[in-house]
Amino acid sequence: MLACLVAFFALVAAANAVLIRAAVSTFGGVEAGNAYQAGLAFARERTEAAAQDSLRWQVDAKVAPVRGETLVEIVARDATGTPLAGLAAYARLAHPTDKRLDRTVELTRTGVGRFEGRSAPATGQWTLEIDIERGDARVFRSRNRIFLR
């Protein structure tokens, strides 16, 4: 009886050790390397978000599969609906669970306030991250969860 009891708990401990090793080796659980710096960045992002809201820009994005690729189109307008000039746009498709699958979409200007880029085919859930800059300053940021088929 004692041998069965010891064998049972040894088996449970061995299974736990294997599962813990697998969990720790695949994801360390660290999202931010330095919590203090992350807190400062959060405060800065709040200030930037308030400034962005005051602009009342209308930025529309369309993401769709086209001929074996993923097409990203962005149109940026001011509060009156006039296309915005003098901007540079950047887009990124971020995978929600695996950063290794993230992909940057190279956008080219196709008109005033219009940008277009293509990426390798993507399906499933993604986060579309859009950054718009004027000069060296970021003036707009958007993060939206999308589902691609």
Image (cartoon, rainbow, N blue to C red):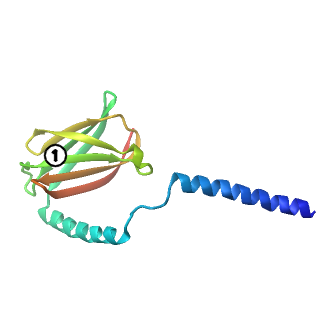
Left or right: residue 34 versus residue 106 is right
Q: Reply above or below: 67 against 142.
A: above
Q: Reply above or below: 106 against 19.
A: above
Q: Reply above or below: 17 against 107.
A: below
Where residue 2 appears, as percent x and y from the top left, is 91, 64
Quadrant occupied by the N terminus: bottom right
Where residue 107 appears, as percent x and y from the top left, is 20, 40
What secondary structure is found at the residue carrying circle 1? strand
Where residue 93 appears, as percent x and y from the top left, is 32, 45
Left or right: residue 64 versus residue 28 is left
- Crowding at dot 1, Cα within 10 Å, few <14 / some 14-19 / many 20+, comes out as many
Residue at point 79%, 62% (across, down): 9
Asked where in the image residue 17 lies, by quadrant, the reply is bottom right
Which residue extends farthest top? 67
Residue at point 29%, 43% (across, down): 104
Q: Which residue is mark 1?
A: 75
Q: Reply above or below: 1 against 149.
A: below
Quadrant occupied by the C terminus: top left
Residue closest to the eye, 66 or 139: 139
Residue closest to the eye, 48 or 75: 48
- Amino acid type at image mark 1: Val
Residue at point 7%, 56% (across, down): 80
Residue at point 28%, 71% (across, down): 40
Left or right: residue 141 versus residue 13 is left
